[in-house]
Protein backbone atom coordinates (compact mmCIF):
# COMPACT_ATOMS: atom_id res chain seq x y z
CA UNK A 1 0.00 0.00 0.00
CA UNK A 2 1.56 3.21 -1.22
CA UNK A 3 0.20 6.29 0.46
CA UNK A 4 -2.40 5.84 3.12
CA UNK A 5 -4.24 9.01 4.05
CA UNK A 6 -5.13 9.84 7.64
CA UNK A 7 -8.69 10.68 8.72
CA UNK A 8 -9.30 13.23 11.51
CA UNK A 9 -9.83 10.22 13.78
CA UNK A 10 -6.29 9.07 12.97
CA UNK A 11 -7.32 6.09 10.86
CA UNK A 12 -5.57 5.22 7.62
CA UNK A 13 -7.60 5.45 4.39
CA UNK A 14 -6.97 3.55 1.17
CA UNK A 15 -8.11 5.21 -2.06
CA UNK A 16 -9.08 2.83 -4.87
CA UNK A 17 -9.86 4.52 -8.21
CA UNK A 18 -11.32 3.22 -11.44
CA UNK A 19 -9.51 3.85 -14.74
CA UNK A 20 -12.26 6.27 -15.88
CA UNK A 21 -12.22 8.79 -13.01
CA UNK A 22 -10.68 12.26 -13.39
CA UNK A 23 -6.88 12.26 -13.83
CA UNK A 24 -6.29 14.30 -10.65
CA UNK A 25 -8.24 11.68 -8.67
CA UNK A 26 -6.27 8.84 -10.27
CA UNK A 27 -3.07 10.67 -9.28
CA UNK A 28 -4.06 10.74 -5.60
CA UNK A 29 -5.20 7.11 -5.49
CA UNK A 30 -3.27 4.26 -3.90
CA UNK A 31 -4.42 1.93 -6.68
CA UNK A 32 -6.01 2.57 -10.10
CA UNK A 33 -7.52 -0.33 -12.01
CA UNK A 34 -10.42 -2.08 -13.69
CA UNK A 35 -13.40 -3.46 -11.78
CA UNK A 36 -11.79 -6.84 -11.15
CA UNK A 37 -8.49 -5.40 -9.93
CA UNK A 38 -10.25 -3.02 -7.52
CA UNK A 39 -12.46 -5.82 -6.21
CA UNK A 40 -9.45 -8.08 -5.63
CA UNK A 41 -7.58 -5.37 -3.71
CA UNK A 42 -10.63 -4.57 -1.54
CA UNK A 43 -11.06 -8.29 -0.78
CA UNK A 44 -7.58 -8.39 0.81
CA UNK A 45 -8.30 -5.51 3.24
CA UNK A 46 -9.23 -6.36 6.84
CA UNK A 47 -10.66 -3.72 9.20
CA UNK A 48 -9.69 -0.88 6.87
CA UNK A 49 -11.24 2.32 5.57
CA UNK A 50 -11.58 2.32 1.79
CA UNK A 51 -12.55 5.31 -0.36
CA UNK A 52 -13.92 3.92 -3.61
CA UNK A 53 -13.46 6.48 -6.39
CA UNK A 54 -15.79 4.98 -8.98
CA UNK A 55 -19.50 4.38 -9.53
CA UNK A 56 -21.86 2.89 -6.92
CA UNK A 57 -21.62 -0.78 -7.83
CA UNK A 58 -17.83 -0.65 -7.35
CA UNK A 59 -18.22 0.73 -3.83
CA UNK A 60 -20.89 -1.90 -3.09
CA UNK A 61 -18.56 -4.65 -4.32
CA UNK A 62 -15.75 -3.43 -2.08
CA UNK A 63 -18.12 -3.40 0.90
CA UNK A 64 -19.37 -6.91 0.12
CA UNK A 65 -15.89 -8.38 -0.37
CA UNK A 66 -14.34 -6.63 2.62
CA UNK A 67 -17.09 -6.96 5.23
CA UNK A 68 -14.83 -5.94 8.14
CA UNK A 69 -13.94 -2.65 6.43
CA UNK A 70 -15.70 0.65 6.21
CA UNK A 71 -16.22 1.58 2.56
CA UNK A 72 -16.87 5.22 1.73
CA UNK A 73 -18.39 6.28 -1.60
CA UNK A 74 -17.66 10.02 -1.92
CA UNK A 75 -20.65 10.73 -4.19
CA UNK A 76 -23.65 8.39 -3.79
CA UNK A 77 -25.32 9.91 -6.88
CA UNK A 78 -22.51 8.48 -9.01
CA UNK A 79 -24.26 5.33 -10.28
CA UNK A 80 -23.63 3.22 -13.39
CA UNK A 81 -26.48 3.98 -15.83
CA UNK A 82 -26.54 0.37 -17.03
CA UNK A 83 -26.66 -1.08 -13.50
CA UNK A 84 -29.63 1.07 -12.49
CA UNK A 85 -31.74 -0.12 -15.44
CA UNK A 86 -32.29 -3.69 -14.24
CA UNK A 87 -34.59 -4.70 -11.40
CA UNK A 88 -34.94 -8.17 -9.80
CA UNK A 89 -38.48 -8.72 -11.24
CA UNK A 90 -37.14 -8.77 -14.81
CA UNK A 91 -34.49 -11.30 -13.78
CA UNK A 92 -36.99 -13.52 -11.92
CA UNK A 93 -39.28 -13.60 -15.01
CA UNK A 94 -36.33 -14.65 -17.18
CA UNK A 95 -35.40 -17.37 -14.67
CA UNK A 96 -38.97 -18.72 -14.79
CA UNK A 97 -38.94 -18.73 -18.60
CA UNK A 98 -35.57 -20.56 -18.71
CA UNK A 99 -35.71 -22.92 -15.74
CA UNK A 100 -32.42 -24.55 -14.79
CA UNK A 101 -30.33 -22.14 -16.88
CA UNK A 102 -27.64 -20.47 -14.71
CA UNK A 103 -27.57 -16.70 -14.35
CA UNK A 104 -24.25 -14.95 -14.96
CA UNK A 105 -24.29 -11.34 -13.78
CA UNK A 106 -21.89 -8.67 -14.93
CA UNK A 107 -20.65 -6.75 -11.88
CA UNK A 108 -22.12 -3.55 -13.37
CA UNK A 109 -25.30 -4.35 -11.46
CA UNK A 110 -26.84 -3.79 -8.04
CA UNK A 111 -26.09 -5.99 -5.01
CA UNK A 112 -29.72 -7.16 -5.20
CA UNK A 113 -29.26 -8.46 -8.76
CA UNK A 114 -25.99 -10.16 -7.79
CA UNK A 115 -27.79 -11.84 -4.88
CA UNK A 116 -30.32 -13.34 -7.36
CA UNK A 117 -27.50 -14.69 -9.59
CA UNK A 118 -25.46 -17.88 -9.71
CA UNK A 119 -22.13 -16.23 -10.45
CA UNK A 120 -20.71 -12.80 -11.32
CA UNK A 121 -18.19 -11.76 -13.94
CA UNK A 122 -16.34 -8.65 -15.06
CA UNK A 123 -15.27 -7.66 -18.57
CA UNK A 124 -11.84 -9.14 -17.74
CA UNK A 125 -13.05 -12.66 -16.89
CA UNK A 126 -16.51 -13.03 -18.52
CA UNK A 127 -15.36 -15.62 -21.08
CA UNK A 128 -13.57 -17.76 -18.45
CA UNK A 129 -16.50 -17.50 -16.02
CA UNK A 130 -19.05 -18.65 -18.61
CA UNK A 131 -16.77 -21.47 -19.82
CA UNK A 132 -16.21 -22.62 -16.22
CA UNK A 133 -19.91 -23.48 -15.89
CA UNK A 134 -19.69 -26.22 -18.53
CA UNK A 135 -23.27 -25.66 -19.73
CA UNK A 136 -24.66 -25.06 -23.24
CA UNK A 137 -26.79 -22.03 -22.27
CA UNK A 138 -26.61 -19.17 -19.76
CA UNK A 139 -28.72 -16.15 -18.91
CA UNK A 140 -26.48 -13.09 -18.91
CA UNK A 141 -27.33 -9.84 -17.25
CA UNK A 142 -27.45 -6.81 -17.75
CA UNK A 143 -25.22 -6.04 -20.81
CA UNK A 144 -26.29 -7.45 -24.19
CA UNK A 145 -23.01 -6.38 -25.84
CA UNK A 146 -20.78 -8.22 -23.35
CA UNK A 147 -23.22 -11.15 -23.65
CA UNK A 148 -22.73 -11.15 -27.45
CA UNK A 149 -18.94 -10.96 -27.04
CA UNK A 150 -18.97 -13.99 -24.72
CA UNK A 151 -21.25 -15.92 -27.09
CA UNK A 152 -18.94 -15.29 -30.06
CA UNK A 153 -15.84 -16.27 -28.03
CA UNK A 154 -17.27 -19.44 -26.48
CA UNK A 155 -19.89 -20.75 -28.93
CA UNK A 156 -22.24 -21.03 -25.92
CA UNK A 157 -25.81 -19.68 -26.15
CA UNK A 158 -25.84 -16.50 -24.08
CA UNK A 159 -29.32 -15.07 -23.48
CA UNK A 160 -29.20 -11.34 -22.57
CA UNK A 161 -31.45 -10.15 -19.74
CA UNK A 162 -32.94 -7.63 -20.31
CA UNK A 163 -32.95 -8.04 -24.07
CA UNK A 164 -31.64 -4.51 -24.71
CA UNK A 165 -29.52 -3.80 -21.61
CA UNK A 166 -26.45 -1.77 -22.48
CA UNK A 167 -24.11 1.01 -21.41
CA UNK A 168 -25.41 4.29 -22.88
CA UNK A 169 -21.86 5.67 -22.88
CA UNK A 170 -20.37 2.86 -24.96
CA UNK A 171 -23.37 3.01 -27.29
CA UNK A 172 -22.23 6.44 -28.46
CA UNK A 173 -19.21 4.76 -30.08
CA UNK A 174 -20.12 4.08 -33.72
CA UNK A 175 -18.45 1.95 -36.39
CA UNK A 176 -18.65 4.66 -39.13
CA UNK A 177 -16.92 7.19 -36.84
CA UNK A 178 -14.06 4.73 -36.29
CA UNK A 179 -13.78 4.12 -40.05
CA UNK A 180 -13.61 7.88 -40.51
CA UNK A 181 -10.72 8.14 -38.06
CA UNK A 182 -9.05 5.16 -39.76
CA UNK A 183 -9.15 7.09 -43.06
CA UNK A 184 -7.18 9.90 -41.42
CA UNK A 185 -4.80 7.53 -39.60
CA UNK A 186 -4.66 4.35 -41.70
CA UNK A 187 -2.01 2.69 -39.47
CA UNK A 188 -4.03 3.29 -36.29
CA UNK A 189 -4.60 0.38 -33.92
CA UNK A 190 -8.20 0.15 -32.67
CA UNK A 191 -9.10 -0.86 -29.10
CA UNK A 192 -12.63 -1.60 -27.90
CA UNK A 193 -14.26 -2.43 -24.59
CA UNK A 194 -16.67 -5.40 -24.87
CA UNK A 195 -19.52 -3.06 -23.84
CA UNK A 196 -19.34 -1.58 -27.37
CA UNK A 197 -21.61 -2.91 -30.10
CA UNK A 198 -20.63 -5.90 -32.26
CA UNK A 199 -19.75 -3.76 -35.32
CA UNK A 200 -17.30 -1.73 -33.20
CA UNK A 201 -15.77 -4.89 -31.72
CA UNK A 202 -15.36 -6.26 -35.27
CA UNK A 203 -13.26 -3.21 -36.21
CA UNK A 204 -10.99 -3.58 -33.17
CA UNK A 205 -7.50 -5.07 -33.10
CA UNK A 206 -8.00 -5.75 -29.39
CA UNK A 207 -11.15 -6.12 -27.26
CA UNK A 208 -10.75 -6.22 -23.48
CA UNK A 209 -11.28 -4.71 -20.06
CA UNK A 210 -10.04 -1.20 -19.30
CA UNK A 211 -6.79 -2.45 -17.72
CA UNK A 212 -6.52 -5.10 -20.47
CA UNK A 213 -6.40 -2.27 -23.01
CA UNK A 214 -3.70 -0.45 -21.00
CA UNK A 215 -1.62 -3.65 -20.88
CA UNK A 216 -2.14 -4.17 -24.63
CA UNK A 217 -0.58 -0.80 -25.56
CA UNK A 218 2.19 -0.89 -22.90
CA UNK A 219 5.64 -0.65 -24.43
CA UNK A 220 4.41 -1.28 -28.00
CA UNK A 221 5.02 2.28 -29.21
CA UNK A 222 2.11 2.21 -31.65
CA UNK A 223 2.04 5.46 -33.63
CA UNK A 224 -1.72 6.03 -33.29
CA UNK A 225 -4.35 4.25 -31.19
CA UNK A 226 -8.12 4.79 -31.52
CA UNK A 227 -9.60 4.23 -28.06
CA UNK A 228 -13.04 2.59 -28.14
CA UNK A 229 -14.02 3.25 -24.56
CA UNK A 230 -14.42 6.05 -22.02
CA UNK A 231 -11.57 8.56 -22.61
CA UNK A 232 -10.66 8.79 -18.90
CA UNK A 233 -8.40 5.82 -19.57
CA UNK A 234 -6.16 7.79 -21.95
CA UNK A 235 -3.84 9.39 -19.31
CA UNK A 236 -3.01 5.87 -18.03
CA UNK A 237 -2.33 4.75 -21.60
CA UNK A 238 -0.01 7.73 -22.11
CA UNK A 239 1.95 6.71 -19.01
CA UNK A 240 2.74 3.29 -20.49
CA UNK A 241 3.23 4.49 -24.09
CA UNK A 242 4.25 8.18 -24.02
CA UNK A 243 5.03 8.52 -27.73
CA UNK A 244 1.69 7.17 -28.97
CA UNK A 245 -1.09 9.47 -30.23
CA UNK A 246 -4.34 8.36 -28.50
CA UNK A 247 -7.61 9.37 -30.17
CA UNK A 248 -11.04 8.78 -28.56
CA UNK A 249 -13.23 6.70 -30.90
CA UNK A 250 -16.16 9.02 -30.17
CA UNK A 251 -16.46 12.64 -29.09
CA UNK A 252 -19.38 11.76 -26.80
CA UNK A 253 -18.22 8.77 -24.76
CA UNK A 254 -17.62 10.46 -21.40
CA UNK A 255 -19.29 8.72 -18.45
CA UNK A 256 -20.83 11.58 -16.42
CA UNK A 257 -21.20 9.43 -13.31
CA UNK A 258 -17.49 8.58 -13.22
CA UNK A 259 -16.67 12.29 -13.49
CA UNK A 260 -18.84 13.11 -10.44
CA UNK A 261 -16.01 11.83 -8.25
CA UNK A 262 -13.86 14.88 -7.61
CA UNK A 263 -10.88 15.51 -5.32
CA UNK A 264 -12.99 18.00 -3.34
CA UNK A 265 -15.61 15.30 -2.67
CA UNK A 266 -12.91 12.85 -1.62
CA UNK A 267 -11.45 15.39 0.82
CA UNK A 268 -14.94 16.08 2.17
CA UNK A 269 -15.57 12.34 2.56
CA UNK A 270 -12.32 11.94 4.52
CA UNK A 271 -13.31 14.85 6.79
CA UNK A 272 -16.83 13.48 7.32
CA UNK A 273 -15.74 9.83 7.42
CA UNK A 274 -18.66 9.12 5.11
CA UNK A 275 -20.99 8.51 3.34
CA UNK A 276 -20.41 4.87 4.30
CA UNK A 277 -21.87 2.17 2.00
CA UNK A 278 -24.48 0.06 3.79
CA UNK A 279 -26.08 -3.06 2.31
CA UNK A 280 -28.84 -5.24 3.75
CA UNK A 281 -26.95 -8.22 5.33
CA UNK A 282 -29.08 -10.85 3.53
CA UNK A 283 -28.54 -9.15 0.15
CA UNK A 284 -24.82 -8.76 0.90
CA UNK A 285 -24.41 -12.44 1.75
CA UNK A 286 -26.20 -13.53 -1.48
CA UNK A 287 -24.11 -11.13 -3.57
CA UNK A 288 -20.91 -12.28 -1.79
CA UNK A 289 -21.66 -15.90 -2.74
CA UNK A 290 -21.94 -14.97 -6.45
CA UNK A 291 -18.82 -12.74 -6.30
CA UNK A 292 -16.73 -15.32 -4.42
CA UNK A 293 -17.74 -17.95 -6.97
CA UNK A 294 -16.36 -15.64 -9.66
CA UNK A 295 -13.15 -15.10 -7.67
CA UNK A 296 -12.62 -18.88 -7.54
CA UNK A 297 -12.54 -19.14 -11.36
CA UNK A 298 -8.85 -19.40 -12.34
P1 LIG B 1 -13.81 -2.56 -16.52
O1 LIG B 1 -14.18 -3.64 -15.56
O2 LIG B 1 -13.28 -3.09 -17.81
O3 LIG B 1 -12.91 -1.57 -15.87
O4 LIG B 1 -15.14 -1.80 -16.96
C1 LIG B 1 -15.99 -1.14 -16.09
C2 LIG B 1 -16.93 -0.27 -16.78
O5 LIG B 1 -17.77 0.33 -16.16
C3 LIG B 1 -16.84 -0.14 -18.22
O6 LIG B 1 -17.77 0.78 -18.67
FE1 LIG C 1 -21.68 2.22 -16.35
FE2 LIG C 1 -21.16 2.74 -18.88
FE3 LIG C 1 -20.35 4.46 -17.00
FE4 LIG C 1 -19.18 2.03 -17.26
S1 LIG C 1 -19.16 3.72 -18.74
S2 LIG C 1 -19.85 2.99 -15.37
S3 LIG C 1 -20.96 0.76 -17.86
S4 LIG C 1 -22.50 3.93 -17.53
Image (tube, helix red, strand yellow):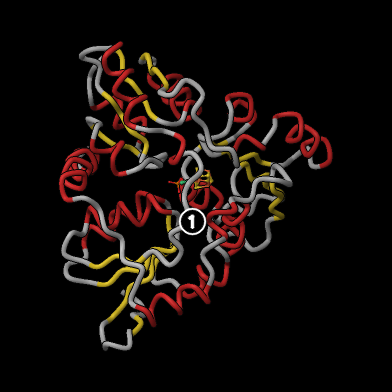
Name the residue at 59% across, 49% down: 230
Looking at the image, residue 79 lies above or below residue 48: above
Question: Which quadrant would residue 180 be assigned to in this image?
Answer: top right
Question: Which quadrant would residue 123 be assigned to in this image?
Answer: top left
Q: Secondary structure at mark 1?
A: loop
Q: Could you say where residue 4 lies in the image, as x and y percent from the top left?
A: 33, 80
Looking at the image, residue 238 lies above or below residue 186: below
Left or right, 166 with respect to 251, comes to left
Question: Which quadrant would residue 62 be assigned to in this image?
Answer: bottom left
Looking at the image, residue 160 lies above or below residue 74: above
Name the residue at 41% across, 75% down: 269
Q: Nearer the viewer, residue 184 or 117?
A: 117
Q: How many marks?
A: 1
Name the residue at 46% across, 63% down: 75
Q: Could you say where residue 288 lies in the image, as x and y percent from the top left?
A: 20, 45
- Residue 172 visible within the image: yes
- Which quarter shows the N terminus? bottom left
- Which quarter shows the C terminus? top left
Name the residue at 28% across, 81% down: 12
Neighbours of disc 1 within 10 Å: few (<14), some (14-19), many (20+): many
Where does label 1 land, which residue? Answer: 78
Q: Could you say where residue 176 lies in the image, as x and y percent from the top left?
A: 76, 29
Left or right, 222 with respect to 33, comes to right
Q: Residue furthest right?
A: 184
Looking at the image, residue 239 lies above or below residue 279: below
Amino acid sequence: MKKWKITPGGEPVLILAHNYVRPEVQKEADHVGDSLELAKIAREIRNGTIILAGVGFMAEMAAILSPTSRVIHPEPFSQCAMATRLNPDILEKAREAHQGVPVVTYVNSSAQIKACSDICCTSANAVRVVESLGVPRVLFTPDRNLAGYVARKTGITVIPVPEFGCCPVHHTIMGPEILDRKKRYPDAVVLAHPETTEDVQDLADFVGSTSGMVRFVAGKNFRTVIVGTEPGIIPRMRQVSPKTRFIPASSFSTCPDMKMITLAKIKQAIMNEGPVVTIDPLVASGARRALERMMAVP
